[in-house]
């Protein structure tokens, strides 16, 4: 089987790291490496990771100055040796069959670039699982790689949480995370623009589990955007960039996709989470 690189960025989440890494060790798929990227965390992250490194030689460690989660994931990608890449935030978990089933899908279907499963939310300290976020956000949009309207779908909603997919590592020869709010949503959009389409498959014990905390990244991104209007500014720049590649993509018959030429209004919607549509109209 093919090696999987599991990339775990960590900043001030040492209290969750044991549980996170245990979920990695619990995977029924065994041929993996786990790269924990300490993004300048002042807590006990290093001490905890070194303890796990002594326990399992497949766990590797990178430490860097604090640059944010996008830079941390990019550092992990640069160090990764795997054919496939799994992202896992340090406060989240993977159910035991998650990687094994998705590796099987990618190995048997070379035309699929990204396979993803379901996500469930749980409150810190509790065991109950929820299919939607308390804010009403639905974490998963089910798409098949042969769907003709993946761009239309992502116009309306991000397809999945960052921990749900297994990506072919070749995708990241051309893409990387950008230091913006909702960087995972933007990455998924860029994947589709680059011809890497998504495919949903569900398996028993194959979900990723997203912890709900008061200081979650989602909440910090909302606050950061509200304070600086950063996302709106980035949308204006990204729109110019994407307009230049729309027509070449629509003419690409090898992808077997019928892509539409989007207006600027539609592209604004495409790279904007629905919760920020109102902000863009202000």
Image (cartoon, rainbow, N blue to C red):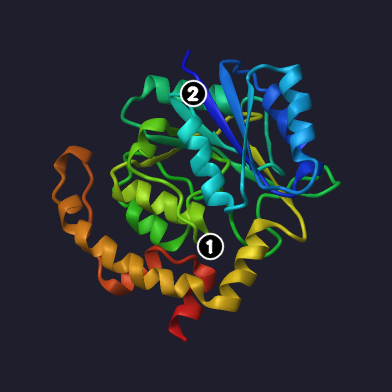
Q: Is residue 252 left or right of residue 59?
A: left
Q: Is residue 275 left or right of residue 233?
A: right
Number of other residues with Cα within 10 Å of mark 1, as a class: few under 14, some 14 to 19, many 20 or more: many
Marking on residue 103: 2
Q: In the figure, 236 relative to 32: above or below?
A: below
Element type at marker 2?
Answer: helix
The single residue placed furthest to the bottom in the displayed view is 282
Q: Which residue is rendered at x = 53% and y = 36% of the image? A: 76
The single residue placed furthest to the top in the displayed view is 1
Element type at marker 1?
Answer: loop
Q: In the figure, 122 relative to 155: above or below?
A: above
Return the residue at label 1: 181
Q: Is residue 88 left or right of residue 279?
A: right
**Residue situated in front as seen by the camera: 100 or 240:** 240
Q: In the figure, 192 relative to 98: above or below?
A: below
Determine the CA span between mark 1 and mark 2. 29 Å
Q: Which residue is rendered at x = 39% and y = 61% of the image? A: 155
- Picture quarter containing residue 252? top left
Of the numbered discs 1 and 2, the one sitting upstream in the chain is 2
Q: In the figure, 169 relative to 238: above or below?
A: above
**Residue situated in front as seen by the camera: 130 or 98:** 98
Expressed as whole percent of the image width and height from the top left, the position of residue 229 reads 52, 77
Q: Which residue is rendered at x = 46% and y = 17% of the image? A: 2
Expressed as whole percent of the image width and height from the top left, the position of residue 96 reads 67, 26
Expressed as whole percent of the image width and height from the top left, the position of residue 208 reads 63, 39
Q: Is residue 116 visible?
A: no
Q: Which residue is rendered at x = 48% and y = 55% of the image? A: 185
């Amino acid at each position: 089987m093919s090696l999987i690189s599991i990339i775990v960025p960590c900043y001030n989440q040492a209290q969750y790291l044991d549980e996170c890494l245990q979920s990695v060790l619990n995977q029924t798929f065994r041929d993996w490496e786990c790269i924990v990227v300490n993004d300048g965390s002042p807590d006990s992250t290093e001490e905890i990771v070194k303890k796990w490194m002594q326990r399992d030689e497949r766990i590797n460690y990178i430490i860097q100055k604090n640059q944010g989660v996008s830079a941390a994931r990019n550092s992990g990608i640069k160090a990764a040796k795997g054919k496939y890449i799994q992202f896992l935030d340090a406060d989240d978990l993977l159910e035991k069959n998650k990687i094994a089933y998705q590796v099987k899908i990618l190995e048997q279907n070379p035309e699929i670039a990204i396979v993803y499963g379901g996500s469930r939310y749980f409150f810190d300290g509790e065991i109950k699982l929820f299919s939607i976020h308390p804010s009403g956000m639905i974490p998963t949009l089910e798409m098949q790689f042969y769907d003709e309207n993946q761009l239309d779908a992502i116009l309306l909603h991000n397809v999945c949480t960052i921990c749900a997919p297994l990506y072919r590592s070749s995708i990241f020869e051309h893409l990387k995370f950008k230091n913006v709010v909702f960087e995972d949503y933007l990455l998924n959009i860029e994947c589709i623009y680059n011809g890497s389409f998504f495919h949903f498959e569900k398996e028993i014990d194959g979900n990723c589990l997203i912890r709900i905390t008061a200081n979650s990244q989602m909440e910090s991104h909302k606050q950061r955007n509200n304070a600086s209007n950063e996302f709106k500014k980035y949308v204006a720049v990204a729109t110019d960039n994407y307009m230049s590649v729309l027509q070449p993509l629509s003419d690409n018959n090898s992808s077997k996709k019928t892509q539409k030429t989007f207006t600027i209004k539609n592209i604004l919607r495409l790279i904007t989470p629905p919760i920020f549509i109102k902000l863009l109209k202000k």
